[in-house]
Amino acid sequence: MSKHVLIVTTSANELSNGHATGLWLEEFAVPYLLFEKEGYKVTVASIEGGDVPIDANSLEDGLSEDILNTRELLKDTARLNQVADESYDAIYLPGGHGTVVDFPENETLQRVIRNVYESGNIVGAVCHGPIGLVNVKLSNNEPLVKDKQVTGFTDAEEKEMQLDSAVPFLLETGLRNQGGQFKGADNWAVNVAVDDRLVTGQNPQSSEAVGKELVKLLG
């Protein structure tokens, strides 16, 4: 039977200061295309359902047709709570600054992540996507990331983007505060942390590496 992967995206299109944002397209598209190539069943959901806002800045870099074509999958997406109780072999959270608005406090997202992980399955996230992991508690009430190697968009990268004052909290700091063993690299360097069934990537440059690690774990 083919593996079933749930990809959950943001539905937020701006930060608290009005800065336009959304999903970072490449972070969705590159792993999605790897999953498709493997023949996995992929369910794409967003926090609120409907059309996913895409950060305009993520469309600037001479992207391939294959990546641009995945935008069709981001129209009229399922609302997360509509697909939350299905069975998944992996959940994957792409980033984009929109995630800082609607991932951290979303209890449905926390529940799905916990259920996937405690079922012995795989959790992956890249760039700002790991902000969805920060508040996840396991059934024993311990943070999911406690004592695990993790990475994500670093405090230094956020400061370089000059958005450190526009986010509710800095992702790296948030992961460290929950006991995560944060593994950062230079700004914009490819960097992935794999800790058993938890796979996290630092930035957009790490999307492909995260996707490949997830495929490897999914066997």
Image (tube, rainbow, N blue to C red):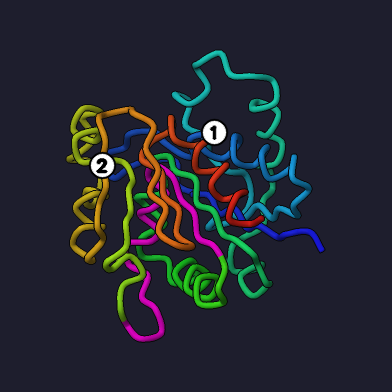
Quadrant into which the N terminus falls? bottom right
Numbered label attached to residue 184: 2
User: Is 131 contained in the magenta span?
Assistant: yes
Query: Is residue 153 found left or right of 160 in the rendered image?
Result: right
Q: Residue at x 40, y 59 (%)?
A: 195
Query: Is residue 143 found left or right of 50 in the rendered image?
Result: left
Residue farthest to the right, as pictured: 1
Q: Quadrant of residue 106?
A: bottom left
Marks 1 and 2, the one that precedes in the sequence: 1
Numbered label attached to residue 25: 1
Circle 2 packing at 10 Å, graded few (<14), some (14-19), many (20+), is: many
Measuring from the top left, give residue 213's x and y in whole percent: 53, 47
Q: Residue at x 41, y 50 (%)?
A: 200
Measuring from the top left, give residue 49's x and y in whole percent: 61, 55
Circle 1 packing at 10 Å, graded few (<14), some (14-19), many (20+), is: many
Between the C-alphas of marks 1 and 2, the distance is: 23 Å
**Image label count:** 2
Query: Is residue 159 found left or right of 140 in the rendered image?
Result: left
The residue range painted magenta reads: 122-141
Q: Residue at x 27, y 47 (%)?
A: 183
Q: Amino acid at mark 2?
A: Gly
Measuring from the top left, give residue 121's x and y in whole percent: 57, 68
Q: Quadrant of residue 65?
A: top right
